[in-house]
Amino acid sequence: MTDTKQFEQTGERLLVRAPAKLNLSLLIAGKRPDGFHAIETIMAKVDWYDEIRIEPGRTAAIEFFCTGPRWAPQDQTNLVYRAAELILRETGPTRGVRLTLVKNIPAGSGLGSASSDAAATLLGLDRYLDLGLSRSRLMEMAARLGSDVAFFLHGPLAYCTGRGEQVTELAGEFPFAAVLILSDVNSSTREVYANYRHDPVLYEQLHAKITAFLDANRIDSVARMCANMLQRSCFQLYKELGERKQAIEALDIGPVCLSGSGSTMFLLFERGDTERVEAVHETLTRETGCGSTVVRNNQW
């Protein structure tokens, strides 16, 4: 899937792909005056996508439809609709649009799919309607839609701080493959953060290590740490996830990391280690019956 492009135009239809992400690290620096948690996270896009189809509308209103194998809200609370409403209100084009979200990535999975859908909608409508919006204008809109949305307006690998909306692209490449361990658990980001109890000593320790690795451009070393300070809170709320992590690690196939606030966990490998990746994927299926899929780092 390395040659897959984000945008494909066919006649009057624009197809926009919205990639999932993995948190290669996730630290909580503390709570901000506005009530949000200050985070420091390295995020990487992967080659698993939702799709958004943009076509001419039959009216001046937004026409929104949702299809695909995964659930998503099919009303005005969906971030695709909210992103379209925001960009059209801000720019004022009179042309109506028809948006169809093909939902392939599960919600509540720590893979950022709703945020990615929102960013893809902003980028897609900017292109489809020839709005010519600056990156800073799109970033401002993204921040109003959600903390992770801004990341998906950038390159495939970035260091994000603040609420997640302050994005610094990371130079170089970090080629990897990952086996995603999927779950029927729909993890609530709000509840995981609400249940979180801050550990300033752990934060300082992890922050020092990760900062040193970043200064040396060793993203691989950061990823091997499997540092996610939301893990304890997530596993307290969803005990089956913690038990699944222990069971998988008992198979001695590698460390299991949690993405975001859960529920997806993953095992990381070098991109070219195809045989090892497939062997681990088969072992997971055979020994645990867990739903899993293989992804690789995205190129854009």
Image (spheres, rainbow, N blue to C red):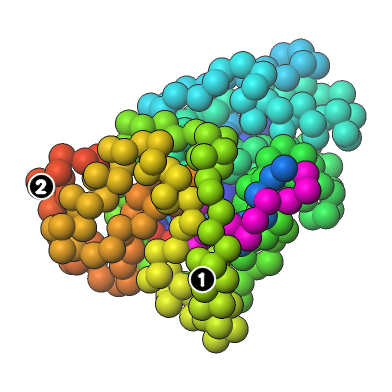
Residue tagged by mark 2?
Answer: 287
Quarter of the figure that contains the C terminus: bottom right
Q: Secondary structure at mark 2?
A: helix
Instruction: Identify the amino acid type marked 1.
Output: Leu
- Earlier-in-chain disc, 2 versus 1: 1
Residue tagged by mark 1?
Answer: 206
The answer to whether residue 260 is visible is no
- In this rendering, is residue 220 above or below 127? below
Is the magenta region chiefly helix, strand or loop? Answer: strand
What number of labels is visible?
2
Q: In which image quadrant can residue 91 be found?
A: top right
Instruction: Identify the amino acid type marked 2.
Output: Glu
Q: Magenta stretch? A: 21-34
Residue under the point 33% across and 63% down: 268
Q: Secondary structure at mark 1?
A: helix
Name the front one of labels 2 and 1: 1
Tell me where residue 96 appears, x and y as whole percent.
77, 21
Quarter of the figure that contains the N terminus: bottom left
Tell me if residue 186 is in the magenta stretch: no
Q: CA distance from mark 2 to mark 1?
A: 33 Å
Tell me where residue 143 appears, x and y as whole percent.
75, 45
- Residue found at the far left of this picture: 286
Residue under the point 79% across and 55% down: 135
Local crowd size for mark 2, using a 10 Å CA cut-off: few (<14), some (14–19), many (≥20): few
Viewed as shown, does residue 275 lie left or right of 39? Answer: left
Local crowd size for mark 1, using a 10 Å CA cut-off: few (<14), some (14–19), many (≥20): many
Tell me if residue 27 is in the magenta stretch: yes
Residue under the point 18% across and 63% down: 253
Tell me where residue 238 appears, x and y as whole percent.
36, 36
Residue under the point 62% across and 65% down: 159
Q: In which image quadrant can residue 271 be found?
A: bottom left
